Image: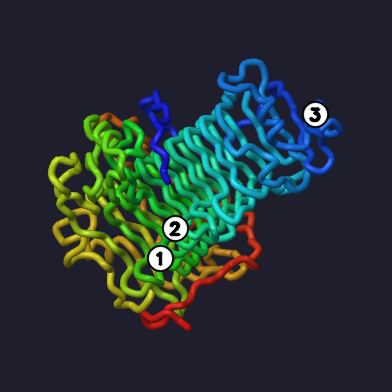
């Protein structure tokens, strides 16, 4: 269940995206606490490997409680071995590192050498880094509420397909997930609710029956870059979705997602849409490569988000009184519109024998929200929706676009309509050939034959909302590709530019479950 505690508001008017410099890269002094599950003793000093404690709980108890660290940071070093759930806190809370004095919890003997079994639950912590550990559970793996400046780096988290969420973060700010392997949920591998200023970069996010990942509930200023996202059911990545009003934090009380940038990702083998926007504002999907996606219906969706009141009527009323969009009592619900969704220069490749069942796109038509909820009426999904520069190879030449009629992108829409989509995108006109996707190489072998990317316009001036929301970045330029190589002079659609680069990683394929093919609109046997 989504907790409704409020996180501190951002103070800056300009919501620049967070740095990728992870905490802990510092020369400041640390108090080191060693833990060894096989040879440690909780009555020992803990300052060296030879005097290690036995449990992480004992180490965590030595970090000062309730006040910002002022003299030194703390580094909890975990010796290689297996840590049972009873070896660490049930609730990791009320520890407050600073930028100069962070709290590091890290494997001492190499990546994934410290193996934790169970569920990590953090609350009200600052400047914490979790690095190099492996966490496995037959259920939820990691939760962070009211966390600020929390970094997950080079970590493996696996919920064994029994997690509601492998990673759940809510009412938190300045979150970084990098260089990690996140998997194993019967719903979502990553679930953000009311998270602002976040980076999800260079991870494998996979093996979830619902979405691989979504950010919703007023999440804002989120960069999702250079990840491999795959083997999921409902969809790959979605900006927005649906949220109980009481779980949102001011001033982000309108859209489900603001200023979310999804660039240079490889998304493959998702039964539902590879990408989606459900109630988003200033959303950029650019230079992603998608392969074997959308067999259930469509490749990409631009639809309404949802807003309900899930029982805390007082909390809903407070947010409504501030100008937020949503109901004030349980039972009511509101559609949340989209505005300024830009989908540029992506590569969609569904190989022979695999296609989206019905159409390329799903764009919903306008809805009339109930009166008095502050939601714009009608609520449009396609207000300044721009889809251009994409190369799509999917299904037959006459495969339906999926716009018009009762949906969005009608002829009168100047930025998105059927004629524009056909003119500004290469849809089933040239077949891209990927080098070896079955072995993890998603580069394009015939990239020079594909149309060049189109320039990406900046987002328009930030809207004046009530309550006012800090402005996000308006520039949409993507300067590097998946491998970190410049796109200047080497630009191509999809995740990889044409420059010389380190080959894309070849992941271990033994844990992959490839989804059934669709032949002539019917799932393969």
Question: Which residue is denoted by mark 2 in the rendering?
Answer: 211
The kind of secondary structure element at disc 1 is: loop
The reply to whether callout 1 and callout 2 are in contact (CB within 8 Å) is yes
The kind of secondary structure element at disc 2 is: strand
Between the C-alphas of marks 3 and 1, the distance is: 53 Å
Closer to the camera, 355 or 137? 137
In the rendered image, residue 135, in percent from the top left (x then y), is placed at 64, 49
Residue 416 against residue 32 in the figure, above or below: below
Question: Residue 458 shows which numbered tag?
Answer: none
Pointer 3 or 1: first along the chain: 3
- Nearer to us of marks 3 and 1 is 3
Closer to the camera, 328 or 415? 328
The reply to whether callout 3 and callout 1 are in contact (CB within 8 Å) is no
Residue 474 quadrant = top left
> At x 74% / y 48%, what residue is drawn?
82
Q: Is residue 349 visible?
A: yes
- Nearer to us of marks 3 and 2 is 3
Q: How many C-alpha atoms fall within 10 Å of the one at disc 2: few (<14), some, or many (≥20)? A: many
Question: Residue 272 shows which numbered tag?
Answer: 1
Q: How many C-alpha atoms fall within 10 Å of the one at disc 3: few (<14), some, or many (≥20)? A: few
Pointer 3 or 2: first along the chain: 3
Between the C-alphas of marks 1 and 2, the distance is: 9 Å
> At x 65% / y 40%, what residue is drawn?
131
Q: Is residue 436 left or right of residue 394?
A: right
In the rendered image, residue 358, in percent from the top left (x then y), is placed at 32, 73
Question: Residue 43 shows which numbered tag?
Answer: 3
Between the C-alphas of marks 3 and 2, the distance is: 45 Å
Pointer 1 or 2: first along the chain: 2
Q: Residue furthest right?
A: 50
Residue 133 against residue 41 in the figure, above or below: below
């Amino acid at each position: 269940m989504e907790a409704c505690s409020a996180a501190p508001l951002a103070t800056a008017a300009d919501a620049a995206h967070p740095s990728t410099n992870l905490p802990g890269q510092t020369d400041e002094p640390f108090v080191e606490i060693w833990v060894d599950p096989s040879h440690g003793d909780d009555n020992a000093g803990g300052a060296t490997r030879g005097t290690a404690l036995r449990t992480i709980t004992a180490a965590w108890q030595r970090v000062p409680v309730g006040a910002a660290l002022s003299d030194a940071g703390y580094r909890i070093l975990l010796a290689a071995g297996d840590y049972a759930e009873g070896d660490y806190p049930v609730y990791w809370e009320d520890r407050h590192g600073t930028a100069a004095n962070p709290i590091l919890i890290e494997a001492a003997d190499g990546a994934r050498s410290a193996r934790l079994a169970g569920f990590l639950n953090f609350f009200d912590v600052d400047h914490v880094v979790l690095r190099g550990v492996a966490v496995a559970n037959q259920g939820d793996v990691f939760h962070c509420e009211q966390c600020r400046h929390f970094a997950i780096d080079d970590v493996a988290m696996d919920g064994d397909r029994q997690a509601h969420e492998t990673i759940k973060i809510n009412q938190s700010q300045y979150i970084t997930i990098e260089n990690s392997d996140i998997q194993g949920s019967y719903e979502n591998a990553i679930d953000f609710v009311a998270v602002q200023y976040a980076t999800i970069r260079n991870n494998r996010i996979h093996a979830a029956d619902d979405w691989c990942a979504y950010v919703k509930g007023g999440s804002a200023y989120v960069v999702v870059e250079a990840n491999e996202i795959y083997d999921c059911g409902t969809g790959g990545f979605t900006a927005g979705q649906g949220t109980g009003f009481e779980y949102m934090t001011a001033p982000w009380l309108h859209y489900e997602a603001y200023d979310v940038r999804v660039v240079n990702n490889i998304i493959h083998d998702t039964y539902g849409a590879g990408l989606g926007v459900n109630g988003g504002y200033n959303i950029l999907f650019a230079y992603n490569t998608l392969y074997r996606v959308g067999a259930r219906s469509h490749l990409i969706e631009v639809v309404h988000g949802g807003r309900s009141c899930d029982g805390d009527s007082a909390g809903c009323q407070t947010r409504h009184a501030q100008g937020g969009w949503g109901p004030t009592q349980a039972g009511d619900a509101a559609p949340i519109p989209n505005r300024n969704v830009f989908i540029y220069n992506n590569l969609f490749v569904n190989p022979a024998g695999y296609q989206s069942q019905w159409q390329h796109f799903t764009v919903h038509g306008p809805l009339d929200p109930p009166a008095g909820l502050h939601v714009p009426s009608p609520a449009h999904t396609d207000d300044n929706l721009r889809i251009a520069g994409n190369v799509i190879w999917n299904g037959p030449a006459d495969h339906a676009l999926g716009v018009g009629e009762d949906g969005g992108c009608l002829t009168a829409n100047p930025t998105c309509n059927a004629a524009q989509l056909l003119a500004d995108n290469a849809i089933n006109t040239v077949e891209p050939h990927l080098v070896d996707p079955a072995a993890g190489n998603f580069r394009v072998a015939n990239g020079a034959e594909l149309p060049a990317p189109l320039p990406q316009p900046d987002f328009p001036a930030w809207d004046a909302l009530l309550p006012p929301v800090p402005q996000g970045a308006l520039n949409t330029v993507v300067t590097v590709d998946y491998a970190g190589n410049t796109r200047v002079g080497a630009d191509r659609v999809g995740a990889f530019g044409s420059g010389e680069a380190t080959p894309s990683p070849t992941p271990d394929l033994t844990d992959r479950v490839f989804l059934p093919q669709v032949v002539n609109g019917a799932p393969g046997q």
